[in-house]
Amino acid sequence: MSKFAPLTTFFLVHLATILLIFPEKTIASTKSGHWEPILIGYMLEWILMWLYLKGLAGFPKMDLADIFNEITGKWAARIILAPLLLFFFIDVCVILRVHSEMLTVTFLPEYPLWSLALLVLVPLYAAWKGIQTIIRATLILFIICMPVTLFSFFTSFGNFDLKNGYPLLDKTFSFMASADFYSSFIAHSGFLFLGFIPLYKYPILKKSKSIFLTYVSLLFFYIALVYIPLFIFGRETSSRFQFPTIISMDSIDISWIMFDRLTLFFITCTLISVFVYAALLLWMMIQLIQKLYLISSLPVIVIILAISVVALAGFLPTWNAVQVLINIDTWFRFYCIFALPLAIFIMGMVKRRKLA
């Protein structure tokens, strides 16, 4: 396995959370200066990830469940990490439901929406096979997806009207009072998976410089996925779209390629990155359940998760119900991305002082 495979996993996990929900929520959060909420969220994740990695460095052979189990005891660990388990569960349901909606809107209008939730079986199988399988697969999937994704981005430049990006500043920071801004933080939770992979197994992850350089490369995608629909349609129009980036890709007309719709390839790559993220979420849920909540065989846990995810993701009645679930998930997400890194940082520092 290439030593860079864990970094490609880190990259694809973030890409999956940026591709759909993030542009819609960021565009809706403010009428101007969209780079401001993008940059604030991006820098906050940078700081939280630094705290997280500093803390994890004090426990190189332990994952998140092991750390809390040792420091706080099993019952306290169960209580502290219960919101994380709920966050993972709701998150996997949301992303599968959103992408099912995307497929019905773009290519499969006649298919019942609940049947598309069975897409969970692909990432569930990967989660069953384990983290090594997921990480190995991401390198291949990255090589397949990135050229198509970048090609889609660059071909959209011909449709740009840069005036649609004005005004450049939101002087009042109005987005800070918008629920959509806080919902967009779904794109800033990808770093949590680093706490489930003991760093000693992956030497490249012990070099925080490698992780942060990978994170720097993601800034282009944070900006591009918001500003592509803004530059093409303007804020007033793109804010009305359910999937502004997908609609932007569908507006591209290239006569010299043999396929009518470039959107097909963009959506395929989107689904691939989502499968990676969903597989990782399900694998982390399995780790938490086995270590803290339910000592049972892997097949039993997998069956329980499959039924639970399909039940919630497949039977949400309306798109408004999905939005309500995203808002509920926001509360768990903020606990997980703020409280847990801070707690791990403090525990890591205390342990280092004891060993000094």
Image (cartoon, grey):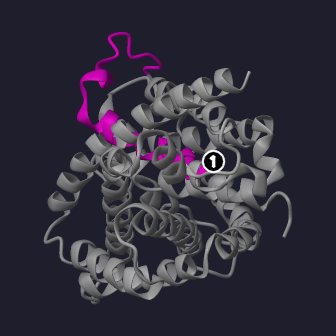
Magenta span: predominant SS is helix
Residue 138 in view (yes/no): yes
Tag 1: amino acid: Phe
Asked if the stretch drawn in magenta spans residue 244, the answer is no
Q: Residue furthest top?
A: 171
Left or right? Give the position of 134 relative to 1: left
**What residue is drawn where x is 64% and y is 67%?**
254
**What residue is drawn where x is 73% and y is 58%?**
6
Which residue in the structure is indicated by mark 1? 157
Left or right? Give the position of 63 relative to 36: right
Query: Residue 140: which quarter of the image?
Result: bottom right
Q: Is mark 1 on a helix, strand or loop?
A: helix
Residue 160 in view (yes/no): no
Q: On screen, 319 above or below 177?
A: below
Say which of 116 and 356 sits in front.
356
Q: On screen, 272 above or below 41?
A: below
Q: Residues within 10 Å of mark 1 (few under 14, many from 20)?
A: some
**What residue is drawn where x is 54% and y is 30%?**
347
Q: On screen, 172 above or below 139?
A: above
Asked if the stretch drawn in magenta spans residue 172, the answer is yes
Say which of 204 and 288 sits in front.
288
**What residue is drawn where x is 49% and y is 41%?**
188
Left or right? Give the position of 299 relative to 266: left
Numbered label tally: 1
Extent of the magenta region? 167-194
Say which of 352 and 268 sits in front.
352
